[in-house]
Amino acid sequence: MSAFEPFEDFGDIDQIIERLNDADGGVRRLAVIDLADSGRQDVLPYLLAATDDPDATVRLQVAIAFAEFDTSEAAGGLVKLVTDEDSSVAQAAADGLAELKDPAAAELMEPLLKNESAFVRAAGCRGLRALRSPASLRPALAAMRDENPEVRAQALGVVAYLKLEETLPSLIGATRDLDAGVRAVAASALSFSGQPAAAAAVAAALGDENWQVRTAAADSLGRNGQSSAVDVLTTALGDEYWQVQQKCLNALGKLKAQAAVPAISKLLLSDIPALRKEAAAALGEIADPAARDALTDHISDSDPDVRKTVRWALTRLG
């Protein structure tokens, strides 16, 4: 068996470790790959040492390798590499942090939220979000006040994933953030709460100046399940962006909004096939016999997906 083939015993590990000191960066990079492929926890100290390799391609491979080990030791290596001077290395480390699930990694990531680099702060938040650790709540709430909108959005994700009613004031406040991206995340995040205040904040976001925020709000109202949102969703069917209309149709279908059937039926006449299909799907979900004529008129729609959905919807009407 060559030194570059999968190994089976500890002697091969020794040979691979020796290659980490080779003068050729390509050889060192392949050694990192082989160590990661072993899946053995005892190779982690050697991978950690390789985070100081002078070759960025080797460090990049180390960052990728750490993603194979869901341990606090691997998290420590990724935390170090996310501050690497090479952007590709730092990005790979950030992606690796977002994949970790070991709760013990939270303590290692939290200092990243105070780093001078906005990229690093955002990466720290991404990592904490995946861990869903209650211990991350306080630093995440602080990061929601960060000067950088990407950091605020990622911090908001940490808070949202915890799904704690006590965080509602912060989440509702974020729907009024100066940055549209943050407002969109906040509108989506509030879907977990059945509190009237949450539903009201998302309904207000459906009138946001940014269409992507409105799209997120419509989707959130559908997932929230609050029947009080039917009127505002029905009104929003007239939005100038078809993406918003599509999410409203989907939400109204989920809410079984019989009162919206006439307005939904009108969108069967849209020039956009995706909207006609979504309108038919919503009518099928609502299953109100009053929609039968409108659906029947489109059983021969020019779009095959629309025709299929119309036929399905009609079966739902009985």
Image (cartoon, rainbow, N blue to C red):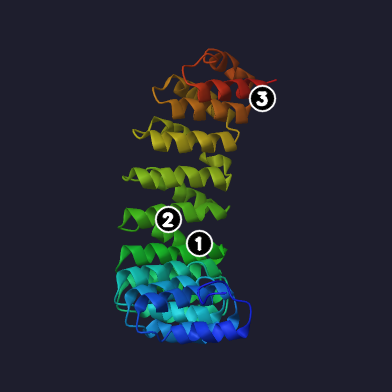
Separation of residues labelled 3 and 2 (CA atoms): 34 Å
Closer-to-camera residue (96/229):
96
Q: Amino acid under label 2?
A: Val
Mark 1 vs mark 2: which is more N-terminal? 1
Disc 1 target residue: 160
Residue 316, numbered label: 3
Residue density around tag 1, few if under 14, some if 14–19, many if 20 or more, within 10 Å: many
The structure residue drawn at horizontal position 39% and vertical position 33%, both measured from the top left corner, is 242
Q: Residue furthest right?
A: 318
In this picture, residue 182 sits left or right of residue 300: left
Which quadrant does the C terminus fall into? top right
Instruction: Say which residue appears at 54% left-offset and 35% top-offset.
Output: 252
Q: Which residue is mark 2?
A: 185
Query: Where's residue 270, x and y in %?
Result: 41, 22
- CA distance separating discs 1 and 3: 35 Å
Q: Residue 281, located in which quarter of the rendered image? A: top right
Nearer to the camera, 302 or 183? 302
Q: Percent from the top left, x then y, of residue 291?
A: 58, 19
Mark 3 surroundings: few (<14), some (14-19) or many (≥20) residues within 10 A: some
Q: Residue sitting at 52 percent across and 25 percent down?
A: 305
Residue 26 placement (x, y as % from top left): 37, 74
Q: Is residue 111 above or below residue 255?
A: below
Instruction: Identify the secondary structure beneath mark 1.
Output: helix
Question: Label 1, label 2: how many angstroms apart (C-alpha)?
Answer: 9 Å
